[in-house]
Amino acid sequence: MATKILGLRTTIYKSNDLAKAKEWYAKAFQTQPYFDQPFYVGFNIGGYELGLQPEEFPQPKSDAVVSYWGVENMNEQYEHFLKLGATIHEAPQNVGGEIIVATIKDPWNNVIGLIYNPHFKTE
């Protein structure tokens, strides 16, 4: 039976200052948005959507679900995010084989996951 789920498409981060978030994410992910409106800012990150939405009334952020963005060099990217003002959530750790994961928090307290996984290939 063929699956009807096509895979991850979009991860959304919310901010009470969309202009500052757009600037921060452009630096953090080293790319400019392809879609930029007051209600949504969209980035194409390796074929996956990173979206920013305004948060009029800040809510507590959950770290119960984390999207992990693939990186080629964990230490380099982890330090890059920290230099831009991200804070440590979970330091890089080997979770088996050569796979390394880490999480940081952006200036709006959103959790961003980073993963180095040399075995994962996109279709």
Image (cartoon, grey):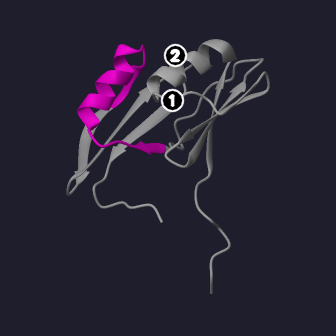
Q: Residue furthest left?
A: 97
The residue depicted at 56 percent of the width and 47 percent of the height is 48
Amino acid at pointer 2? Pro
Residue 53 is covered by the magenta coloring: no
Relative to 110, 28 lies left or right: left
Nearer the observer, 117 or 101: 117
Q: Amino acid at mark 1?
A: Thr
Classed neighbour count for the residue bearing mark 1: other residues with Cα under 10 Å, few (<14), some (14–19), many (≥20): few
Residue holding disc 1: 31
Residue 79 within the segment the image draws in magenta: yes
Residue 13 location, x and y as percent?
A: 62, 31
Residue 64: percent from the left, percent from the top?
Answer: 53, 41
Counting from the top left corner in percent of width and height, residue 4 is at 68, 73
Give 117 or 32, whichever is nearer the viewer.
Answer: 32
Rendered location of residue 27, percent (x, y):
47, 21
The numbered dot on residue 107 is 2
Residue at image x 62%, y 82%?
A: 2
Residue segment shown in magenta = 68-90
Q: Is residue 52 above or below residue 56?
A: below
Check the image and report above or below for 68 versus 23. below
Measure how far apart labels 1 and 2 are at the Cα level. 18 Å
